């Protein structure tokens, strides 16, 4: 169950939207941020907040690539597999990432840090190959650059975990 503060925040956002459906992606993304992925419970909560049925939310959720209906790693790597990126090394990038992380496309690393997903055009066609992690878009990604980006992302996840652990220890 989501905290009351988040529920009130989302209710306010829905109230300010022109239609409830307009707020659907926003609501699903916030619930996903809270749970790590859009769980069945989150679908029911989104439906309640939006005044839709769970099935309607499910339909919206499966339409958007950035909404995850299965558990994902702390960082989701979206690798563009559309034509412009494909033409400038998109396959090489995906193969490198899969080998480096030890997962097939669609999979999650054993430590739960990364999920690797192919995706449609990310709107960065002139700067391919392109990948996106969280809200950050990376263009002209060579395998060397990808390795460096993953190293930094892994460090950031480690730092965030450390901070969470510190809060737990402090009883926060
Ligand atoms: S084709 Fe890759 S970003 Fe458009």
Image (cartoon, helix red, strand yellow):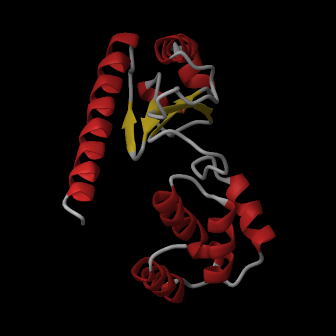
Q: What percent of the width, then of the height, locates residue 99?
A: 52, 11
**Residue at x 62%, y 24% (from the top left corner):** 105
Ligand 1 - quadrant of the structure image: top right
Q: What percent of the width, then of the height, locates residue 64?
A: 65, 52
- In the rendered image, which quarter contains the C terminus? bottom left
Q: Is residue 45 left or right of residue 165?
A: right
Count of numbered labels shown in the rendering: 0
Q: In the rendered view, would you say 57 is above or below 33?
A: below
**Residue at x 32%, y 39% (from the top left corner):** 157
Q: Is residue 172 left or right of residue 84?
A: left
Q: What percent of the width, then of the height, locates residue 76?
A: 49, 38
**The quadrant where residue 45 appears:** bottom right
Q: Nearer the viewer, residue 161 or 140?
A: 161
Q: In the rendered view, would you say 117 is above or below 38?
A: above
Q: Is residue 144 left or right of residue 166?
A: right
**Residue at x 21%, y 52% (from the top left corner):** 166
- In the rendered image, which quarter contains the N terminus? bottom right
**Residue at x 72%, y 53% (from the top left corner):** 62
Q: Nearer the viewer, residue 109 or 126?
A: 109
Q: In the rendered view, would you say 94 is above or below 32?
A: above
**The quadrant where residue 82 appears:** top right
Q: What percent of the width, then of the height, locates residue 154?
A: 33, 30
């Amino acid at each position: 169950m989501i905290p009351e503060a988040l529920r009130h925040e989302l209710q306010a956002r829905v109230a300010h939207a022109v239609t409830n459906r307009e707020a659907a992606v926003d609501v699903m993304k916030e619930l996903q941020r809270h749970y790590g992925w859009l769980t069945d419970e989150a679908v029911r909560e989104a439906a309640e907040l939006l005044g839709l049925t769970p099935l309607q939310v499910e339909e919206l959720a499966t339409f958007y690539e950035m909404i995850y209906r299965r558990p994902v790693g702390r960082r989701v790597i979206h690798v563009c597999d559309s034509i412009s990126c494909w033409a400038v090394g998109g396959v090489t990038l995906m193969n490198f990432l899969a080998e480096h992380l030890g997962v097939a496309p669609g999979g999650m690393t054993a430590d739960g840090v990364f999920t690797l997903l192919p995706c449609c055009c990310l709107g960065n066609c002139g700067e391919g190959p392109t990948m996106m992690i969280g809200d950050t878009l990376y263009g002209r990604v060579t395998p060397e650059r990808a390795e460096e980006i993953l190293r930094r992302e892994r460090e950031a996840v480690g730092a965030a975990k450390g901070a969470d652990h510190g809060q737990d220890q402090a009883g926060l």
